[in-house]
Image (cartoon, helix red, strand yellow):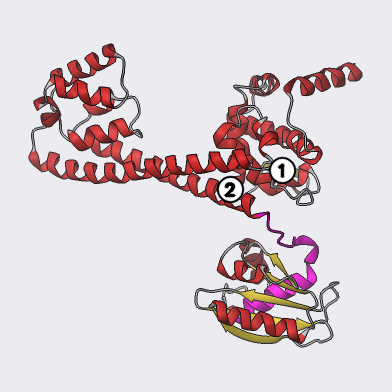
């Protein structure tokens, strides 16, 4: 199993775990791999890395592992002589399945398989080149924010189901329940009896202090509260659901505060980022999608070789399969889901701000394409546009693109 992958003097597969890491290392001048285990601690990882540095005289070493981020990755990135090659877990699982049809998994074996994959299929792996710290901070922030947004959606759905069981009128009084106004109202008046027992003056003061300035809206709410009829008088229903709702609302309130905190931090870092002007120029990007698109592309212009590469990696580009005389197209199952969401969700938003994007969407829908398929097609076109702007370091200009479209059609005619 002699290595022929240049320019590394040694290659290794590293199977990580919470408490220890199994390693299979092959010297470029040897046919016999060496196995070892190191504990998961900063001291053990550093001792192992420095021993490699001394053994191979600070020459480059390639390490394959199933991570793009995580403690062991962060620990190894600081060594200049080490190059990390992340392998997708699904790719390794399929590779493992070709050798162990029983599905058995073993850490030393996985370390060997990662080494073997690195040596035989290095062209399919891309070395890990971390972005600058500011871009990585922004990338982590936008991903974490999305996590809390998903948590907010789950909580609002659960709150809705709970309130419908004993206090459905409150959902009619407020348009949105993922707001401080709704949360504070429920915490203060968690049942219909409590709300109806309150004075109109106190209710009016509550709405005014929560930035409800329209008197007609306040009057309609107070009148609806007075005239509401209870769904049930059964305490066996009301008390358990009231307690559940109050606890859910407390969680929802905290999540809303967390999202607001992330929004402020992301907006500040986005505006101070070197790529701000470019990504802020995109139609409809704004404070939400601008930072996400910036994190998707980053600052390293060598990260992607073409727009098609980004489309395939993000899962926006479809997959063509052929078998015999049949062929069919489907979307990519293995891709960074958050990245695909970023492009598709922003493509949908861009229809409100870009003339050609709206025209393109309407044209495809009229041709019978589904909403989601059309958004992915629109995202595919946007990626090509952004890639050109990104490579040239020039902000997007709608009039320039419309002129180019008009000129292209004139040439085709």
Compared to residue 249, the image places residue 3 above or below, namely: below
* Residue at 79% from the left image edge and 74% from the top image edge: 60
Residue 383, image quadrant: top right
Q: Residue furthest top?
A: 216
Q: Nearer the viewer, residue 384 or 279?
A: 279
- The quadrant in which the N terminus is found is bottom right
Compared to residue 235, the image places residue 203 above or below, namely: above
Q: CA distance from mark 2 to mark 1?
A: 21 Å
Which region is colored magenta?
A: 108-132
Mark number displayed over residue 138: 2
First-in-chain label (2 vs 1)? 2
Classify mark 2: helix, strand or loop: helix
Q: Is residue 109 magenta?
A: yes
The residue beneath circle 1 is 311
* Residue at 78% from the left image edge and 79% from the top image edge: 58
Where residue 407 appears, as percent x and y from the top left, is 86, 19
Q: Residues within 10 Å of mark 2 (few under 14, many from 20)?
A: many
Residue 22, image quadrant: bottom right
Q: Does residue 142 appear to the left or right of 99 in the view shown? A: left
Q: Nearer the viewer, residue 149 or 234?
A: 149
Where residue 16 appears, as percent x and y from the top left, is 58, 73
Examine the residues drawn in magenta and state their main secondary structure: helix
Residue 253 in sight from this viewpoint: yes
- The quadrant in which the C terminus is found is top right
Compared to residue 102, the image places residue 47 above or below, namely: below
Q: Residue furthest front?
A: 272
Where residue 71 appears, as percent x and y from the top left, is 56, 68
């Amino acid at each position: 199993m002699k290595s022929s992958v240049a320019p590394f003097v040694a290659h290794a597969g590293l199977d990580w775990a919470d408490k220890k890491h199994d390693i299979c290392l092959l010297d470029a001048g040897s046919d016999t791999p060496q196995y070892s285990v190191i504990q998961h601690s900063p001291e053990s990882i550093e001792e192992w890395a420095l021993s490699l540095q001394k053994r191979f005289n600070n020459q480059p070493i390639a390490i394959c592992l199933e991570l793009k981020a995580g403690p062991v990755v962060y620990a190894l990135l600081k060594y200049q002589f080490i190059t990390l090659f992340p392998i997708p877990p699904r790719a390794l699982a399929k590779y493992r399945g070709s050798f162990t049809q029983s599905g058995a998994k073993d850490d030393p074996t996985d370390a060997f398989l990662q080494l073997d994959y690195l040596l035989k299929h290095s062209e399919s792996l891309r070395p890990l080149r971390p972005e600058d710290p500011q871009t990585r901070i922004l990338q982590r922030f936008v991903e974490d924010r999305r996590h809390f947004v998903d948590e907010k959606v789950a909580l609002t759905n659960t709150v809705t189901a709970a309130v419908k069981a004993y206090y459905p009128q409150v959902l009619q009084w407020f348009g949105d329940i993922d707001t401080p106004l709704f949360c504070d109202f429920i915490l203060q008046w968690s049942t219909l009896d409590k709300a109806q027992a309150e004075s109109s003056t106190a209710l009016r003061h509550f709405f005014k202090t929560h930035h409800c300035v329209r008197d007609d809206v306040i009057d309609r709410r107070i009148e609806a509260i007075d005239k509401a009829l209870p769904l049930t008088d059964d305490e066996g229903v009301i008390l358990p659901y009231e307690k559940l709702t109050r606890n859910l609302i407390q969680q929802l309130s905290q999540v809303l505060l967390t999202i607001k905190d992330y929004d402020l931090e992301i907006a500040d870092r986005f505006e101070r980022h070197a790529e701000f002007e470019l990504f802020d120029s995109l139609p409809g990007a704004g404070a939400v999608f601008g930072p996400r698109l910036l994190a998707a592309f980053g600052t390293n212009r060598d990260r992607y070789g073409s727009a098609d590469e980004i489309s395939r990696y993000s899962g926006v580009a479809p997959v063509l399969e052929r078998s015999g005389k049949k062929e069919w197209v489907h979307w990519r199952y293995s891709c960074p889901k958050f990245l695909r969401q970023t492009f598709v969700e922003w493509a949908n938003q861009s229809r409100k701000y870009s003339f050609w994007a709206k025209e393109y969407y309407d044209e495809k829908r009229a041709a019978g394409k589904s909403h989601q398929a059309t958004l992915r097609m629109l995202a595919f076109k946007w990626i090509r546009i952004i890639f050109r702007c990104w490579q040239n370091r020039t902000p997007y200009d709608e009039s320039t693109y419309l002129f180019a479209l008009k000129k292209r059609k004139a040439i085709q005619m």
